[in-house]
């Protein structure tokens, strides 16, 4: 399984970015995936998750600003990030699970496969 993130960068507060996670050896359709981030000096935290049937879950800090989605034809996971804030700064990781949850989970230990991360800087 390989997960490759892209789309990170540097933006000003209030700006937008769309992160992509291209999967190989793993089918995004019908599986559980999520985005995590790790800011400087902070623990890795769950940002958004999507379950087997497309149910979504967001961290309170990003609700109303971020949207997680899948493109089954491209076998890719996305994270649309709008109204970015400085506290959104950090390395953002795509994660995929072998388990097929009906409801999304945002606990790092529950995911089996990880991408290398893409940096998001808001300043």
Image: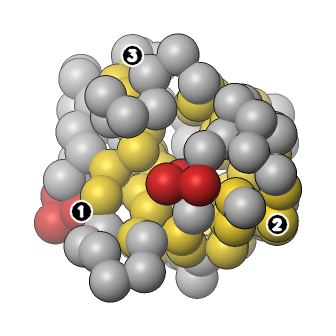
50 to the left or right of 41: right
Secondary structure of residue under mark 1:
helix
Please name the residue shown 42% across and 57% down the image: 36
Q: Which mark is residue 9?
A: 2
Q: Nearer the viewer, mark 1 or mark 3?
A: 1
Contact between marks 1 and 2 (CB within 8 A): the answer is no
Q: Which residue is mark 3?
A: 55
Instruction: Say whether disc 1 or disc 3 marks the residue closer to the N-terminus.
Output: 3
Instruction: Say whether disc 3 or disc 2 marks the residue closer to the N-terminus.
Output: 2
Q: Position of residue 109 (x, y in %)?
A: 16, 66
Q: Tell me: residue 100, above or below residue 6.
A: above
Please name the residue shown 58% across and 29% down the image: 66
78 to the left or right of 10: left
Please name the residue shown 76% across and 35% down the image: 14
Please name the residue shown 55% across and 73% down the image: 91
Q: Tell me: residue 31, above or below residue 60.
A: below
Image quarter of residue 121: bottom right
Q: Nearer the viewer, mark 3 or mark 2?
A: 2
Image quarter of residue 25: bottom right
Q: How crowded is the residue under tag 2: few (<14 C-alpha within 10 Å), some, or many (20+)?
A: some
Secondary structure of residue under mark 2:
strand
């Amino acid at each position: 399984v390989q997960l490759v993130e892209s789309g990170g960068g540097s933006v000003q507060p209030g700006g937008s970015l769309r992160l992509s996670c291209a999967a190989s050896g793993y089918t995004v359709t019908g599986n559980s995936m999520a985005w995590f981030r790790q800011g400087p000096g902070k623990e890795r935290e769950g940002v958004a998750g999507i379950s087997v049937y497309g149910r979504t879950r967001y961290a309170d800090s990003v609700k109303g600003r971020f949207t997680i989605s899948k493109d089954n034809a491209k076998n890719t996971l996305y994270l649309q990030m709008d109204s970015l804030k400085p506290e959104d700064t950090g390395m953002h990781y795509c994660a995929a699970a072998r388990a097929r949850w009906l409801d999304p989970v945002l606990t790092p230990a529950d995911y089996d496969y990880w991408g290398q991360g893409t940096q998001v800087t808001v300043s």
